[in-house]
Image (spheres, rainbow, N blue to C red):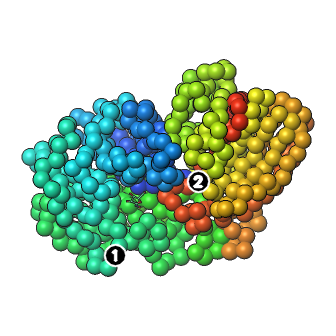
Amino acid sequence: MSDTPQADATVANPVIPGFHPDPSVCRVDDDYYLVCSSFEYFPGIPVFHSRDLLHWTQIGNALDRPSQLRLTTSTPSSGGIYAPTLRHHDGRFWLSVTNVTEGVGNMLFSATDPAGPWSDPIHLPGVPGIDPDLTWDEDGTCWCTVAGVAQVRLDPYTGETFGPPRKLWSGAPGAKAPEAPHLYRIGDYWYLLIAEGGTERCHGVSIARGRTPGGPFEPCPANPVLTHRGTDHPIQNTGHADLVQGPDGSWWMVLLGVRPRGGTPGWHVLGRETFLTPVEWVDGWPIVGEVPTELPAPAWPLVPGPVEAVRDDFDLSELRPQWISLRDRPAEHCTTKERSGWLTLRARGGSLDEPDVVFVGRRQQHPTCEVRTRIDPAEGRGGLAVRLDEEHHYEIEASDGEVRMLSRVGPLRTVVGSRSVPPGPVVLVLRVSTTPPRDARTGPDTLTFGFEEPDGTFAPLGALDGRYLSTEVAGGFTGRVIGLYATTGTVHFDWFDYEQSAP
Ligand code: 6LW
């Protein structure tokens, strides 16, 4: 680990790769914290920490117990938890989110330590819509601003609202979906930052300013202040931003974007990722250039976090925070306490086509990677999957004496290949590669599944085009999650390796 700035060093953008959309950031003294949306996965709302704004380490998940987040099979994929705002006020961290399904709506949580524990939810029945922002004015009054864009006064300690929501701004004429508002006091103005155009190729960021947190707001003449629409920039769909100051007082924006590959317009497979980009202020308006794929070393020391180990040996009593389960994680279906040093998954009936499948995974964070796991399938059937949703997944699974590769793409279910193997544990392997170079004919990547023969030789079962596990094909708001699952009985996993590989 080094904390010395290197003049010629660059840091890769996205600063948080993989499915980490809707970033909201907050600075407290020398520390930065950032949260993202989590949708149908539990625990919800990953929380990251940084000392330099460029390197981020996940320190927990804010919603990590059922009293805070109860997702059932009624929550569809890409339902659940949307668009958090993270702020620090009155000695506490405050987090507002929407659960768009099961009638839950907007909620507020608070904590003294962003690593947790976070409070139980305070429900906000008087706050309609999605993307709730929180801000406090000079008198200490709390304002909650939501997509649309509308605002209501709020008591954050009780969730009580005062009066009906008041419309503030509809964004630029003709631009759809004014959403993701964040309101800030900067200098003499209150700035209202929003996303517009929808979270796809037209996505952008616009801003307006007023003298009070309730407006009236004057739109920036240069809106949208950020968009990559109509360009062939390698980062697309840029929007849903939040502003923060660097350690030296410079201004920065965190935002979501995607990296389509394989021809034009291409397919993006890692979901919406968190990027960082510099902001200049001219005449009281922010100027944001194109988002760079490499960030030049800043004027302050870089503080890289710990390097994530390739192997998870399942040697802790709790899973590390990178692991996310589908909808819930009851101990009787997912535990590291049953067999020491192993992860045990106990099926509850469904295959990966079903919303109740027992699945626990981590986000695919790199365009190319190799994943391996050692499974003991003596008491059931389970395996290693790449999942986008119930209708889009590829997997390799083992039962005692057989390994088979499956794919589900829309209505098509296919057994790609199968092989007999000696009874007992077997190592399952996934390789995500981009060789030969990608174009519209080859798609964004190739996913090869196989297993290791007893002598360690790789035995492939099949290779599939990755475009069918992309957001352009599947739709939705998430990205690929690579993980372990059980469909029948009980299966045990000795370890799980995830390693970025050469393209
Ligand atoms: C989120 C909205 C958006 O609520 O997508 O990109 C929605 N912006 O603001 C889900 O992430």
Residue displayed at 47% across by 72% down: 201
Image location of residue 82, percent across then percent down: 40, 52
Q: Is residue 113 visible?
A: yes
Q: CA distance from mark 2 to mark 1?
A: 29 Å
Q: Is residue 37 left or right of residue 440?
A: left
Callout 1 environment at 10 Å: few (<14), some (14 to 19), or many (20+)? Answer: some
Mark 2 or 1: the one toward you: 2
Q: Quadrant of ligand 1?
A: bottom left
- Type of amino acid at the residue the image marks with label 1: Ala
**Local SS, label 1:** loop
Could you say which is closer to the camera, residue 111 or residue 9? Answer: 111
Q: Position of residue 438 (x, y in %)?
A: 70, 69
Q: Quadrant of residue 492?
A: top right
Q: Is residue 241 above or below residue 118?
A: below
Q: Residue at x 66, y 65 (%)?
A: 467
Q: Secondary structure at mark 2?
A: strand
* Residues under numbered marks 2 and 1 in contact, where contact means CB atoms less than 8 Å apart: no
Q: Position of residue 272 (x, y in %)?
A: 50, 58
Q: Is residue 201 above or below residue 362?
A: below
Classify the position of the C terminus by image quarter.
Answer: bottom right
Residue under numbered circle 2: 389
- In which quadrant of the rendered view does residue 409 lie? bottom right
Question: The disc labelled 2 sits on which kind of residue?
Answer: Asp
Does residue 304 appear in this view?
no
Provide the residue designation for mark 1: 175
Q: Nearer the viewer, residue 74 or 501?
A: 74
